Image (cartoon, rainbow, N blue to C red):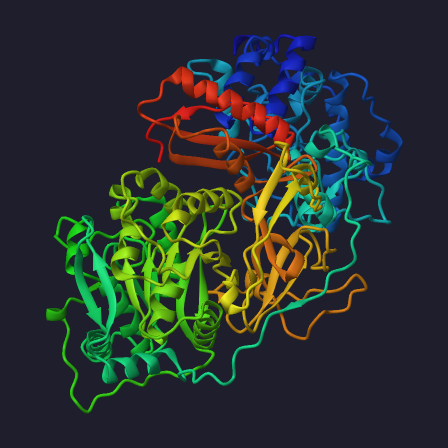
Amino acid sequence: MADRGCPLQPVPLPAEVRESLAELELELSEGDITQKGYEKKRAKLLARFIPLIQGVDTSLQAEPRIPGPSQTMAEAPKQQKPRPTNSRDERFRSDVHTEAVQAALAKYKERKVPLPSKRRSILVHSSVETCTPPDTSSASEDEGSLRRPGRLTSTPFQSHSSVEPWLDRVIQGSSTSSSASSTSSHPGGRPAAALAGLMAHTHIADLHSAPPDVTTGLVEYSHCERPQPAPVRGVPRGCSGRLLDTAGGVPVNSRVSSKIQQLLNTLKRPKRPPLKEFFVDDMEELLEVQQPDPNQPKPEGSQMVVLKGEPLSLGTPWPPSLLAALQRWGTMQPKAPCLTSLDTTGKAVYTLTYGKLWSRSLKLAYTLLNKLTSKNEPLLKPGDRVALVFPNSDPVMFMVAFYGCLLAELVPVPIEVPLTKKDAGSQQIGFLLGSCGVTLALTTDACQKGLPKAQTGEVATFKGWPPLTWLVIDGKHLTKPPKDWHPLAQDEGAGTAYIEYKTSKEGSTVGVTVSHASLLAQCRALTQACGYLEAETLTNVLDFKRDAGLWHGVLTSVMNKMHVISIPYALMKVNPLSWIQKVCLYKAQTALVKSRDMHWSLLAQRGQRDVSLSSLRMLIVADGANPWSISSCDAFLNVFQSRGLRPEVICPCASSPEALTVAIRRPPDLGGPPPRKAVLSMNGLSYGVIRVDTEEKLSVLTVQDVGQVMPGANICVVKIDGAPYLCKTDEVGEICVDSNATGTAYYGLLGITKNVFETVPVTAGGAPVSDRPFTRTGLLGFIGPDNLVFIVGKLDGLMVVGVRRHNADDIVATALAVEPMKFVYRGRIAVFSVRVLHDDRIVLVAEQRPDASEEDSFQWMSRVLQVGVEAHSFCLSVAVPIQGFF
């Protein structure tokens, strides 16, 4: 302190130092550095300039530059000047800041309002105090109080006014933020110790003043004119000339406060774009929009009308319900054969009689209603859903479980046996079970032993499945009901009879509910259309848990006391000719197959000379709607016609999970018209138009009719896209059915249920065609001559490339036409589409035969590509043979 009497020369800070200080202030206000880091960097920048003023003499003190309060209020408007904004350094002038502080404090002193509190700690002082040199001279208390917009009281040393001129010159051009903080003490330095001594004698008043209300907004006062603050980063451009007010009306120049105010204003007045702007796809502007071809074919026929089927026979003594028919046959003719099950060698394992079916179903119903309890309460109540988990090789126990649930007024949900814990298809089934509220699963002892087990030995919990209780329904696990116990057999009604699962194109699984009334109507319609009689024999190769295998082999057969020969698919893999052998052995009148079964039996029929199919009066082709089924039917007829097969016996049909059986071809003795074929242009079909062509071309599709409309049903064809307008007679659309023998809903899905099961077709003028709703079938087709139904594809297999439509079944038929026998294993071909840039890309996958070479397979693929271009006018870019894909 020896040099205290020496005169102090003003030392202005260099431009780079002032710029560094300004950048530090900005970084601190924006949160880029911490408070401690800011203090260290600021002390480092000012360290070399502080020793120059340690010899301040009190006699050299000039008059205080800061005027009194009254003088400040009078001169503030005159001293206010527009602030330049063209230079970075000019944005941080301390004189402007000092004038604003003087005006604010003078106004505060008059109004006596609490000062605004800052977001920073109240123990941190402003940057001006940190630069105050350690001094001793006296000054007035009023002058010392005008330091910052905080209420600071002078210390006994009264040293503030002695260094005011020095501060004004040193900090000129530095940051003017009202929220700047003090620097840290320099270790071992005298200036830092002097500053600490000064701060030790300074106390802060009103530490607990009320926080500012930053939501008040900008308030104008007419009794005083405010100085213009410096532009603050973070404030909108339009607000640079205005000050933010706290609740007490004190202007606040803090960057933190301005940012909070900006955020609150944004939250109060959010600028939300219109709803339609949320769904604008920018990619559509980058893609070339394909314009429709002016020369493309267009429908030219007249508007079609609703096609009505024949009415159900009224004079036929129909049973009042399916359960009534079961009770009748089970009690009156208990020894009549109902179902014969075969093993993988083709040997008959067990024949279930109608008496056994009735008695076992009663035992199961009694057990489900009376022997299953949870916390002394029945586990099940009427209307609950129960899962049926049975393999395809055990139709006997499935039939017992199905009718046992119906007798107990429970809703059976047949599903496939899960193979692994994390099977993808099993997860979708589990979602269906969860949505249906299934808590109980019925199975057999052999099936349960084959299920994956947990460490405890119980059946493992499958991924995506709800918690289930597993019940084995073998005879020893069931309880015989008392003689006076009788089930409440439900008659025809709107209650749900069973739920059949369906897998959509995207892989999701939904449950189609079928009511008791629809179940009974379906059995009656099939009986009339197929001419079923009592004690007839039916050979069933299909899955008995769903679709036509369930409708014919489990339901309609019981109504007519028929004998069903169930052939497991495992036997068909070993011996594809087994179903023909069983037809000959049991003299079956009806056979239920698919075109694939007819195709593989052709390959295995060599050497079988004692085969006769003369007993067949109906050979029902369940997948007759597929375009490739006609080739299998024609080839099968050519081979077996010499062995007793008549051409009119082959009866393709069309069905869907939603509408059940849509149409079926009938033999002439049942009043059916002669079968017909249609040779259609693939180019016209891709535009949804029917154009007859000749068979000499590759670009044609030959389809066969699927028969007439089911009895008691009405059919129409509606447009695929948009509102359900009726199609023209030469236009392809989706077939809709109005009948009592259809599904009723998707379980638990009201939205898509209304779109599918409650469609109201309208004419071109918008008038509804009927007062009854129609059910969409998901089948694409048209009505041909003699009121025959033709199917050209399915809605799930529809792929749109450009503006043209292609069907997966058509592409499979094209690939099968290129001699796949030597290259493709068992004809396993899959076709699907991949969405790329708002368009579909078609992919064809074929499983290569183990004995086929890579070179031969690629040659076959090249031919498929060439035929695809010629037949469908599109190109498959990549095709890879896969061994063991399926």
| Horizontal side, residue 377 vs residue 654: left or right | left
Residue furthest to the right in view is 78
Q: Quadrant of the C terminus?
A: top left
Tally the numbered discs: 0
Q: Quarter of the image holding residue 235?
A: top right
Vertical side of 687 occupied by 42: above or below: above
Residue 682 vs residue 6, the one in the foreground: 682
Q: Position of residue 477 (x, y in %)?
A: 13, 70
Q: Quarter of the image holding residue 848?
A: top left
> Could you tell me if residue 247 is visible in this image?
no
Vertical side of 576 occupied by 846: above or below: above
Q: Position of residue 665 (x, y in %)?
A: 52, 60
| Horizontal side, residue 95 vs residue 193: left or right | right
Residue in the image at 44% along x and 35% along y: 829
Q: Position of residue 780 (x, y in %)?
A: 60, 51
> Could you tell me if residue 756 is visible in this image?
yes
Residue 767 vs residue 395, the one in the foreground: 395
Residue furthest to the front in view is 642
Vertical side of 799 occupied by 165: above or below: above
Residue in the image at 41% along x and 15% along y: 855
Vertical side of 776 occupied by 288: above or below: above
Q: Quarter of the image holding residue 409?
A: bottom left
Residue 131 vs residue 503, the one in the foreground: 503
| Horizontal side, residue 306 vs residue 476: left or right | right
Residue in the image at 47% along x and 53% along y: 647
Residue furthest to the left in view is 476
Q: Position of residue 488 (x, y in %)?
A: 31, 85
